[in-house]
Amino acid sequence: MDFNDVIGQQEAKDRLIRMAGEDKVPHAILFCGPKGSGKMALAMAFASYLLKSSTLEHPDLHFSYPVIRPPQTGSEHKMSSEDFAREWYDMLHHDYYFDLEDWLGEMNAANQQAIIGRGESSAILHNMSLKSSQGGYKISIIWLAEYMNQECANGLLKLLEEPPAQSLFMIVSEQPERLLETIRSRAQRFDIKRISDEDLAAALSSKRGLDEDVAMRLARMSNGSWTDALKEMEVDNEKKTFLDLFILLMRLAYKRDIRELTKWSENVAAFGREKQKRLISYFMRMVRENFMYNFHNPELCYMSVEEEQFSRNFARFINEANVIPINELLQRAFRDIAQNANAKIVFYHLAINMIVLLIRK
């Protein structure tokens, strides 16, 4: 892999190359940025650049990432990335851009949530204590570091405080605020912006063969995320299901149909928690887009044709009186699901309260 495999982000590439050229590479870099922006791709490309190797299965390059505990695995086993190394490299060989949803699918996670546990800090210490095979850097890339539990985070902190010789830690995070403040303070933060619409559209045209108009519409709707753009292209993609559920919720709430809203909440409660969080995030986006639709400025809206068709008649119900309360309701639901609250109660509360909020003017 090299920097040519990274979509857009020329400024970030130049900064990294300059950092290496000036011999100013810190022992720990915290790559931050929105989903699908290419944080991980940049980290892998930079690692390849420093190691002077295009292969990601280099003996001096080590990966850490969230994993699940398979049902038959005993509690005495300390899970680490090594337990899913085959699945990890299979995914990397398929594409350099992926998200947690893709990775959970590779692990056949079902409803399980992935974490980076205490076994991982021991594995990182072991790998980074080894002598470099070629006399250069030993690099540890920690993907979605915010999924570390407390024990692993404490172990990593000790390594960052007293790093082994010639070691380089690349910490990749979408939610750096969830990391220990002491970890953040010991890593040089490297912020990455969303991919520009122009770069994203160009990549969709060159890599997926879309014509320019379709590529630009898809790029704008994907909000600078290559992974979201690819999912939008799927014939039977998840967002179509989410749109149907959003439409049904709003129609049932408008009709005050308690019985059907109860069925709706039970149906959604049967999803896995990661899917439930994606659903709520989609609802928040649709609320925002419908509010902006009322300004009748196409440059402010980022919706698919199907979404826009529904919004033509629905957008007027999202107004200045209720857009903030509805968003707060959805944020609370997202937080409760993330904290393992009872999903049936969470989504029933969401559905019933939507009745009251939807009629505010």
Image: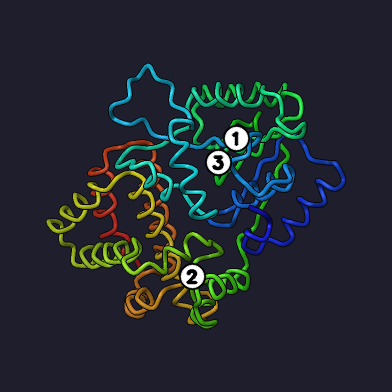
Q: Residue furthest right?
A: 22
In percent of width and height, residue 16 lies at 76, 50
Which mark is nearer the camera, 2 or 3?
Answer: 3
Q: Answer with left or right where residue 277 lies relative to residue 225.
A: left
Q: Answer with left or right where residue 144 lies relative to residue 86.
A: right
Between disc 2 and disc 3, whose residue precedes?
A: 3
Q: Residue at (15%, 57%) from the top-left corner? A: 258
Q: Is residue 225 visible?
A: yes
In percent of width and height, residue 307 lies at 36, 73
- What residue did someone put label 3 on? 143
Amino acid carrying label 1: it is His
- What residue did someone put label 2 on? 221
Do residues under tags 1 and 2 come within 8 Å of each other at their CB atoms?
no
Placement of 64 over or under 198, stated as above or below: above
Disc 3/disc 1 C-alpha distance (Å): 11 Å
Amino acid carrying label 2: it is Met
Which mark is nearer the camera, 1 or 2?
Answer: 1
Between disc 3 and disc 1, whose residue precedes?
A: 1
Based on the displayed image, in which of its 4 quarters is residue 122 positioned? Answer: top right
Q: Secondary structure at mark 2?
A: helix
Based on the displayed image, in which of its 4 quarters is residue 186 positioned? Answer: top right
Q: Residue furthest left?
A: 259
- What residue did someone put label 1 on? 62
The disc label shown at residue 302, or none: none
Q: Is residue 359 visible?
A: no
Q: Quadrant of the C terminus?
A: bottom left
In percent of width and height, residue 305 lies at 39, 78
